[in-house]
Image: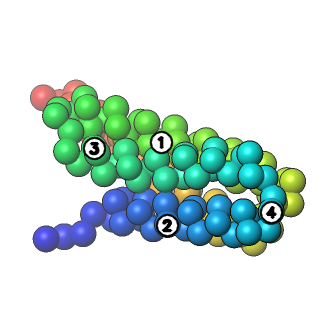
Amino acid sequence: MKENLLVDLSRAFAVDTVKLCTAIKERKQGNALLNQLLRCGTSIGANIHEANYAASRADFINKFQIALKECYETDYWLAIFKDTAMISAGEYDVMFEKCSKIRKLLISSINTAKGTACNE
């Protein structure tokens, strides 16, 4: 069976998010904000995974749209962490690039699913 790139990327991103939050916690920084990044960064993959078992095309699109919103929220928190020096510019760049790739794939998938739904 062919691997699902979006599922794989989002799962790897969730693992990277957990590792980054663990590193920040070990540095004794931003404990109050860590949950925000941890929740949205791991929620992306959870919603993508759940979309694979959607009850309908509308449900599938909805789950992907939630995952997309979580990507945007993750971008926000990553920028805050970088701007407050809780993470380095390098850490930010790596995570932002991964999140951006997932976001682009989600947008493409949503547009495709919506386009297909309009042609039925």
Of discs 3 and 4, which sits in the foreground? 4
Q: Which residue is mark 1?
A: 68
- The amino acid type, in three-letter code, at marker 2 is Val
Q: Closer to the N terminus: mark 4 or mark 2?
A: 2
38 with respect to 5 (left or right): right
The residues tagged by marks 2 and 3 sit, at their Cα atoms, a distance apart of 19 Å
Of discs 1 and 3, which sits in the foreground? 3
CB within 8 Å, label 3 to label 4: no
Q: Closer to the N terminus: mark 1 or mark 3?
A: 3
The answer to whether residue 18 is above or below residue 73 is below
**Element type at mark 4:** loop
Q: Which residue is mark 2?
A: 15
Q: Closer to the N terminus: mark 2 or mark 3?
A: 2
Task: Residue at 25%, 29% (x, y): give it.
Answer: 58
Work out whether residue 89 or residue 21 is closer to the camera in this orientation and state it.
Answer: 21
The answer to whether residue 58 is above or below residue 60 is above
Q: Closer to the N terminus: mark 1 or mark 2?
A: 2
Q: Which residue is mark 4?
A: 28
